[in-house]
Amino acid sequence: MNVTVLLFASVADRAGTRRVELPHRQGDTVGDIRDRLVERFPQLAASVPTLLYAIDEEYARATDVVPAGATLALIPPVSGG
């Protein structure tokens, strides 16, 4: 089973895509999946310190476990007014 990773704003721009499917491994945390994504898209590494995360539309921490089949969103800080 996979995890769907949604990328927003500058993170999507850097990766050149808004959606990525990654294989799920038992016990995967948000941080594990994020790190595999950064391996695939090294240009995302600079964004890691400021990212927010959501699992199935609920905010999450890097240490939270991601269930198989879930959707993980990587959300950079957004400014505007």
Image (cartoon, grey):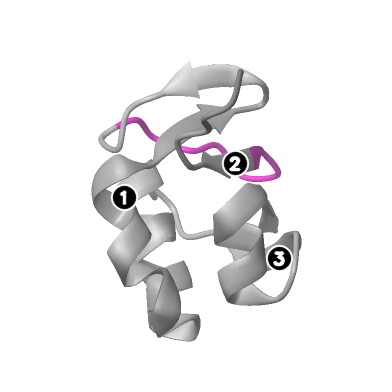
Precedes in sequence: disc 1 or disc 2: 1
The answer to which of 11 and 68 lies nearer the viewer is 11
> Circle 1 — which element?
helix
| Label 3 neighbour load within 10 Å: few <14, some 14-19, many 20+ | some
Cα separation, mark 1 vs mark 3, equals 16 Å
Name the residue at 24% across, 48% down: 49
Q: Which residue is mark 1?
A: 31
| Label 2 neighbour load within 10 Å: few <14, some 14-19, many 20+ | many
What percent of the width, then of the height, locates residue 51? 38, 42
Cα separation, mark 2 vs mark 3, equals 10 Å
In the rendered image of this protein, does residue 64 appear above or below residue 32? above
In this view, which residue lies farthest toward the front?
A: 81
Cα separation, mark 1 vs mark 2, equals 11 Å
Q: Is residue 69 located in the magenta-colored stretch of the structure?
A: yes
Callout 2–callout 3 Cβ contact below 8 Å: no
What percent of the width, then of the height, locates residue 71? 68, 40
Q: Is residue 74 located in the magenta-colored stretch of the structure?
A: no
